[in-house]
Image: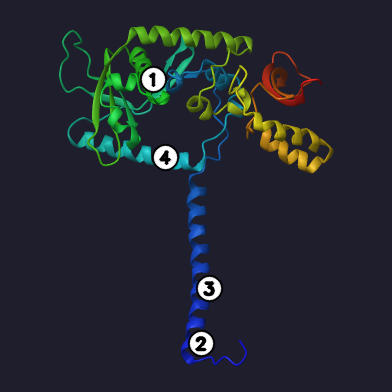
Amino acid sequence: MAGEVITPEKFLTSRQAKQEDFVLSEAEEIAAEIGQRLDTMRQDKREPKDHSAWNWASELGHPCKKFLVHARLDWKERQLMDIDGEYRVEEGNQAEWQLKKDLGDIGFVINESQRTFTIPELKIKGRVDGFLPLNRKIRNFPGLASVPCEIKTINPNYWASTKTLEDIKTHRAWWIRGYPSQLNAYLYASNSPFGFFILKTFGKRPRIIPMLLDYDRLDGDFHKIEDVNRHVEAGTYPERIPYDPQICGMCDFAHICQPLRATEFSEVSASEEEVLKEFLWLKEWHEKYEDMKKRLIGDRNKPGRFWGINAVVGGFVIETKVQERTVYDIPAEVKAPYARKQEVVITQIKKIDE
């Protein structure tokens, strides 16, 4: 302002403010660099592990058979864990190491950590967290000195709902429900009559939960894996399960499977008719049309609000079809036996009279 008198106090205050802005900017850059280096150190840069020959014991309890087939046939296309997942795995490994140390300090030294087990006739493979010594004789099992154990780090939100084996078997989270299938496979492979879950969460006393070898679960899991093996050998896929936000939303193969959010006609508000009319009109204006297409339909990686549904809205129809395409794992000129089928979801918006 013209004629304004800059007093020494105002001058010092202005200079201090500029200095603080500069220092804050420098500090933010340092913080960003530290964060980036921490992320880079933890990011999984490896290619997906070859899963083609074996069904992993840790996935036996997965509720979707189609996922298990994708894990064998399409292991190269499996989406890798995000950076937050890398931190969770690291913290889980640290908690497991500390728990093993604590158990060793009281005379229960876990041995044979990461021992590999296979069930060749079913092509099942896995690595057990370790064997817990019993430190006593078990009646009718005179030679039994240790049994398999699985150490699981539980989200604090689920700690209150994992107090017993029955809680685990019936848990609302599908991955927790699957834990018994993994341990059960290790009990079967090691000819052990029972084993233990050792559960840990932040700031709580660990839980030691015994589990007997469950023949009914074995029967169900083994029949499922037999069917998975048949599909893998034939290069085919089982029917997809009904869309489940928790299962499908966490699936590493959702971009391949493209699970339909609905297989029957969905209810869409009549007010959307004007939006659909605008969408089709915009086809003449390519740039705007493509932008709206992303929002309304999208694709397998980022579905729009009408992707994967069938619906009638006024004079318009939203139509979804599933087509099979042939995919080659090696150059196309070398076809059999490397060719396989892959389903693709196609959603279109049309006038009913078209």
Indicate left or right for 45 with 87 as reference: right
Q: Residues within 10 Å of mark 4 (few under 14, many from 20)?
A: few
Q: What kind of residue is marked 2?
A: Phe
Q: Residues within 10 Å of mark 3 (few under 14, many from 20)?
A: few
Residues at marks 1 and 2 touching, judged by CB atoms closer than 8 Å: no
Q: How many angstroms separate mark 4 from mark 3 (CA)?
A: 35 Å
**Mark with earlier residue (4, 1):** 4
Q: Which residue is mark 1?
A: 182
| Front one among 134 and 280 | 280
Q: Which residue is mark 4?
A: 88
Indicate left or right for 186 with 354 as reference: left
Q: Which residue is mark 3?
A: 22
> Which structural element holds mark 1?
helix
Residues at marks 4 and 3 touching, judged by CB atoms closer than 8 Å: no
Q: What kind of residue is marked 3?
A: Phe
Q: Of the residues tagged 2 and 4, which is closer to the observer?
A: 2
| Number of callouts | 4
Q: What kind of residue is marked 4?
A: Arg
Task: Give percent across and percent down for residue 307.
Answer: 65, 28
Tell me: residue 194, above or below residue 91: above
Q: What kind of residue is marked 1?
A: Gln
> Which structural element holds mark 4?
helix
**Mark with earlier residue (2, 4):** 2
Q: Which residue is mark 2?
A: 11
At horizontal 75% and vertical 16% (from top left) the residue drawn is 335
